[in-house]
Amino acid sequence: MSETFPTIIQGGMGAAVSNWRLANAVARRGQMGVISGTGLDSVFVRRLQLGDPDGDLRRAMEHFPCKATVQRVLDLYFIPGGKAPEARFKSLPMFRLEPTREHLAATILSNFVEVWLAKEGHGGAVGINLLEKIPLPNPCSLYGAMLADVDFVLMGAGIPSQIPGILDKLSTHDRTTMRLSLEDDTIGGGAELVFDPKTVFDFPMPNLKRPNFLPIVSSDVLAQALIKRANGSIEGFVVEHHTAGGHNAPPRGGGTRNERGEPVYGARDTADLAKMASFGRPFWLAGSRATPAGYEFARANGAQGIQVGTLFAFCQESGIEHELKMSIIEEVKAGRVSIYTDAVASPTGFPFKVAEIEGTLSQAEVYEKRTRVCDLGYLRRMYRKEDGSIGYRCPSEPDADYLKKGGMAEDLVGRKCLCNALMANVGVGQVRKNGLAELPLITAGDELVRLGDFIKDRNPAYTASEVLDYLLAATPASAG
């Protein structure tokens, strides 16, 4: 264990659930605040179209090193006073292997702004969480975060062995490359993702701090593989149990499911903590450890501490739309919420934790009324076309479109559009041509059903600081 690192990591949840306000509040207390970089470019431009009422985004943009980029983004997306409620959001183009310079700049700016605001006014640690399963924006997202002096990078939903080397190169503004696999790749070799900061900003800048890299793993086996295969240094690990929210690693034992259709996990899916400790790197336990006893268990078994998601997801500072958040808390208190590990909902093919809540897309009858559309495209998969070129498809897009692109009919069953739902969770859901807005789909860990115990003697509008007080209640001051 290293006392130079925080002992509690606030999880990087959803699209903007872990927003700058939450990360700032946690970091001010000496723990690690984390912003979610997933879909942040879209969240950012939609916040601008809502008028940036508190002026926070524009205040942070004043510190961005390229003023011309700031002005272009404001000209394209900022609406003084905000758009009309019935008006549609103007969207960025979907990411491609070769995005436009304007899209790259907007993505870099969005990540800079979120990290800058998370770090404002204190000297605590701030991290950014990204997904290996959404690779195309990752290099420029990381670069934007590093321009704002981000301290940690956390990444899961895959095996991020190429990220350490990319961080090394970005710290000196060098060109980066990443090999990506393709579906239906009869030619072989995959594809190469190239990002060169100098093609976006053509003026000299000082070298950047290289942030600490913490892969999110489900097992000691994966942690050991990353140590051997990574192309740069790994400073620690988050060891995530399958009870954690969001995407879960598939079971190592195969495709067995229970009577509800959920994947069945076994002993092989729980990390050996003694082996984790033997790697000589700090690690944090995630998933069902968000109690004082869970914290003490982690510390007693060689961990640096714990990562906590669900308790922070429903605190006052999180990005979940306020009325939705309060209604979920009331449902939890009444015992009407359950968690379902959906084996097919996510287009990634990874199991995805869904909170079963009335009126959200967790209900089959509600989701079936939604017209399929893919206009954000973060979870699209790249594939090799018959002519050798690269195409993009998503099993949550319209059936006919997916099948026309060579997708398999069985891949369509049960898929949900996580991209649009996660935007709706944080109040920036798209308004469709029929005037209806996209509906939310809440992900949370198994701990959500016990949230009622936590708030039993608290105001339902509890704060991030109250979560930390609770977790550290039985902890000596030196450990916090």
Image: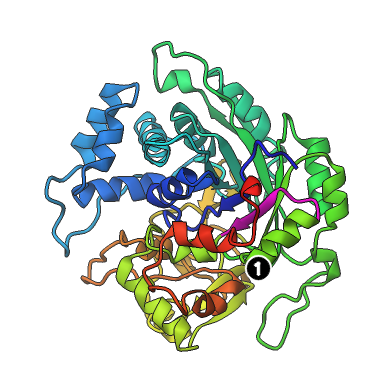
| Quadrant occupied by the N terminus | top right
Q: Nearer the viewer, residue 61 or 470?
A: 470
Its colouring scheme is: rainbow
Dot 1: element:
loop
Question: Residue 85: x percent and y percent?
Answer: 17, 63
Residue 103 included in the magenta stretch of the image: no
454 versus 382 height, above or below? below
Quarter of the figure with residue 247: bottom right
* Amino acid identity at mark 1: Ser
Magenta range is: 301-308
Residue 19 position (above or below residue 358): above
Other residues around mark 1 within 10 Å, as few (<14) / some (14–19) / many (≥20): many
> On the picture, is 228 further left or further right than 185?
right
Residue 304 shown in magenta = yes
Q: Position of residue 25 (x, y in %)?
A: 42, 49
* Residue located at (66% from left, 42% from top): 214
